[in-house]
Image (cartoon, grey):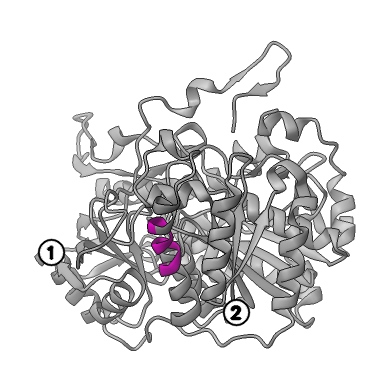
Amino acid sequence: MTDLEIAKNTKLYDIREIAKKLEIDEDNLELYGKYKAKISEKVYENVKEKQDGKLVLVTAISPTPLGEGKTTISIAVADGLARIGKKSILALREPSLGPVFGIKGGATGGGRAQVAPMEEINLHFTGDIHAITSANNLLSAIIDNHIYFGNELKIKNVTWKRCVDLNDRQLRVVETGLSNEKKIVPRRDGFDISVASEIMAILCLSESLEDLKRRLGNIVIGYNEAGEPVYARDLKAQGAMAVLLKDAIKPNLIQTLEHTPCIMHGGPFANIAHGCNSIVATRLALKLADYTITEAGFGADLGAEKFLDIKCRKANISPDAVVCVATLKALKYHGGIDKENLKEENLEALKKGMENLYRHIDNLKNKFGLKVIIALNKFNTDSETEINYLREELKKKGVELSLVESWAKGSEGAIDIAKKLVELLDKPKPKLNYTYDLKDSIITKIEKVAKNIYGAEGLEIEEEALQKIKNIEKMGYSNLPVCIAKTQYSFSDDPKLLQIDEPFKIHVQDVVLKAGAEFIVIITGKIMTMPGLPKQPASEQIDIDENGEIVGIF
């Protein structure tokens, strides 16, 4: 059966029953049908004095086109903990429509390790991303309306882009205001995908509605004739934007197919944004259960680094342990084997591909100072010889391996990792080491991530990007963390450089101040903030049948 068929053939509990597991009463729920609800902000106020549970971060090796199943493993771990009698909860990101209709597919897990209702979550869910899109584009409309009516703020250079939650490369650069109406000023513009919007980052890093509104007001929309920043608050835009986001800031409650609670909220990409669910959701989850399982996007060099250096620093939290996900197919792919031959046993390719895994382990264990366990997402075609080889090699490095078979077996396939995690979590909590100090200069921060996490020998910075860094420092924002936009497929900024045997540099193409999100985006290589569809997009398989049933989402 497909993931969608498995999900549809599983009986879900009424979401009020899931809430009862967390001691949340119905008065503090806003129901979106039978299986989805928003959680009132009052719930956190009621539990904020409780001791936090254990926090487990799920990350992965550098991703491949095959998909490593990081969300599937996150769900499996939470279900596995529940199966052995532990009170567990998930804190995940919301899916974007871009990947759903593009190449990556949905983001609700797979097989018997899914959150549900699968198709509703992968499509419009509770409307959070639509609200973000509307708030983003309202600000764009306010900017151009201000210019139309005389431009009192003397805006010269608009840096704020419109957005849409779809992959549409045609919108990367557009011309607006071409109607030839009197006073309309044509200008060059562009679209980001909604999950790359600064408003998505703001939603995920805000601690309350009041904090959200403050951050919205701090958005830099462009620069005036004197080269000074113009803020959204100068346009009196933050109040109306906050109104559009008043429900979106409330976290969403759903369930796994085995009825483990899941708080799903926010969804920034990790290669072009910071890749973590909301602070609001994670903090709440830590108060509601003994074990919180959360996920950071793409490989540990991207999502985990940003989770640790941006989110943990802001929220004053840190993981008690890290699960790093790998598959034999992905390891052999990194070892140079093409997709058609990955099912065949090949110890030489596996050995070579394991260098990618070792780099991530070294970063997590020795650079960040965290406890790590490797989750091997097992497939039926996996070779026992290769599994045993991987286990023995990891043992030499003092790292535990656990086979996870939850795609086929549900929580039964995650008992081993659940038990090993509990044992690991019973040991003293490690101290998180950040990659850089906020007092470091912007270039020093970029260099420390590039050298210590990516393994680069240094930076090459475009002259225009260098000037932007100087301007940001003059504006007083040099103490913000950096959010590096980089390809997910390689430690370098070249997506084709899977095996890195020669010294390389990170090429900084652009720098963007996100004063509302309170970080600085560093764009490297050829990264795009508006993806495109592949030659054969997933949308070709998605349909609705004569009975009104959705088919084809994976």
Residue at the image point whose x is 9% and y is 66% from the top:
463
Locate residue 309 relative to residue 86 in the image: left or right: left
The answer to which of marks 1 and 2 sits earlier in the sequence is: 2
Residue position marked by numbered label 1 in the rendering: 462
Q: Is residue 227 above or below residue 74?
A: below
Taking the view exactly as shown, the residue that stands out farthest to the left is: 463
Q: Can the viewer see residue 346?
A: yes
Secondary structure of residue under mark 2: loop
Residue 312 image point, x, y percent: 54, 76
Front in this rendered view, residue 506 or 138? 506
- Within 10 Å of the Cα at label 2, are there few (<14), some (14-19), or many (20+) other Cα atoms? some
- Within 10 Å of the Cα at label 1, are there few (<14), some (14-19), or many (20+) other Cα atoms? some
Q: Is residue 261 magenta?
A: no
Q: Is residue 299 above or below residue 439?
A: above
**Number of disc labels:** 2
Residue position marked by numbered label 2 in the rendering: 317
Q: What stretch of residues is rendered in magenta? A: 352-359
Taking the view exactly as shown, the residue that stands out farthest to the top is: 546
Front in this rendered view, residue 114 or 423? 423
Residue at the image point whose x is 80% and y is 30% from the top:
9
Residue 28 image point, x, y percent: 82, 59
Secondary structure of residue under mark 1: loop
Q: CA distance from mark 1 to mark 2?
A: 35 Å
Q: Is residue 98 above or below residue 146?
A: above
* Residue 550: quarter of image: top right
Q: Is residue 357 magenta?
A: yes
Locate residue 428 relative to residue 47 in the image: left or right: left
Q: Residue 421 got which mark?
A: none
Classified by dominant secondary structure, the portion drawn in magenta counts as: helix
The three-letter amino acid code for the residue at tag 1 is Glu
Quadrant in the picture for the N terminus: top right
Q: Are marks 1 and 2 in contact (CB under 8 Å)?
A: no
